[in-house]
Image (cartoon, rainbow, N blue to C red):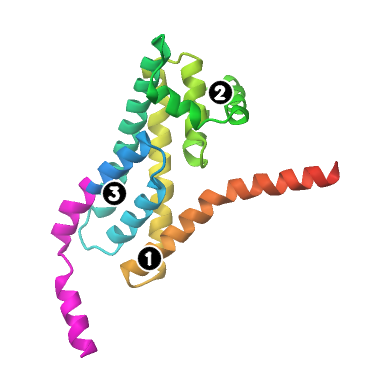
Amino acid sequence: MTETWLAAAVRTVPPESTQQALGYPSLFLLVLIGALVPVVPTGALVSSAAVVAFHQTAPFSMALVFVTASLAAFLGDMALYWLGRRGMKSKNGSRWLEAIRSRAPEDRLTQAQEKLAEHGVAVLVLSRMVPAGRIPVMLACLMAKWPLRRFARGNLPACLAWAVTYQLIGILGGSLFDEPWEGVVAAIVLTVAVSAAPSVWRRVRGTTTKAKA
């Protein structure tokens, strides 16, 4: 009975062509939305897609995941920055600008402004890799009145590095297990661990500093 059920389940798995036809547009749309509304865990999405691509036989699956994720992240960031610039120029601001400001605590914004003044475009690359670091740096760029073209020059390598990093996490998860779903779970756990590590480290340092004081 169990064997019959498993066989039926295997037969219902869509072929690779169907998975790709649905998967890449879905990945693009979700990463794009995640860039505009930074509540979607886009890193986990990219890692999960990389796991699925790792287990596929199509020759360019991994490359397509990379191109899809990096392009969607870049376009989403550019759209959000453009909307933020419109809000900065408007006397009444905009809801998009307010959304950016609400996700940039004062201490993070001050730190981002200092780093931006010291290192310029390079800060954008690091901000994409640090959890909750992208929005404060983007707001710092807006307040520094960076033109769209200058922001794009820094944002492009940032999105490429971000896509590569989370894709490598997915490849690691996929290589550890034979079944794709197991690799997806492992990739999500690794992504959450990587995302949480900086926050945990800051809390540990803060606690240590208070204890010494």
Quarter of the image where the N terminus is located: bottom left
Is tag 2's residue or tag 1's residue first in the polypeptide sequence?
A: 2
Three-letter code, disc 3: Val
Task: Give the alpha-carbon distance from disc 2 to disc 1, as whole Å.
Answer: 37 Å
Residue density around tag 3, few if under 14, some if 14–19, many if 20 or more, within 10 Å: many
Q: Secondary structure at mark 3?
A: helix
Q: Which residue is mark 2?
A: 116
The magenta-colored residue range is: 1-25
Secondary element at image label 2: helix
Residue 27 in picture, x, y percent from top left: 27, 47
Residue 14 shown in magenta: yes
Q: Nearer the viewer, residue 199 or 127?
A: 199
> Which numbered disc covers residue 65?
3
* Residue 152 visible (yes or no): no
**Mark 2 and 1 residues: CB-CB less than 8 Å, in contact?**
no
Of all residues, the one furthest to the bottom in this rendering is: 1
Magenta stretch: helix, strand or loop mostly: helix
| Residue under the point 40% across and 52% down | 44
Residue 170 occupies which quadrant of the picture? bottom left
**Which residue matches tag 1?**
183
Name the side, left or right, on which 191 lies relative to 183. right
**Residue 149 spot, x, y in % from top left:** 36, 18
Q: Give the mark, 1 or 3, whose residue is nearer the N terminus.
A: 3
Look at the picture and state if 149 lies above or below 37: above
Q: Sequence order check: which comes first, mark 2 or mark 3?
A: 3
Q: Residue flagged by tag 1: what amino acid is it?
A: Gly
Task: Judge the density around disc 1: few (<14), some (14-19), many (≥20) Cα neighbours within 10 Å.
Answer: many
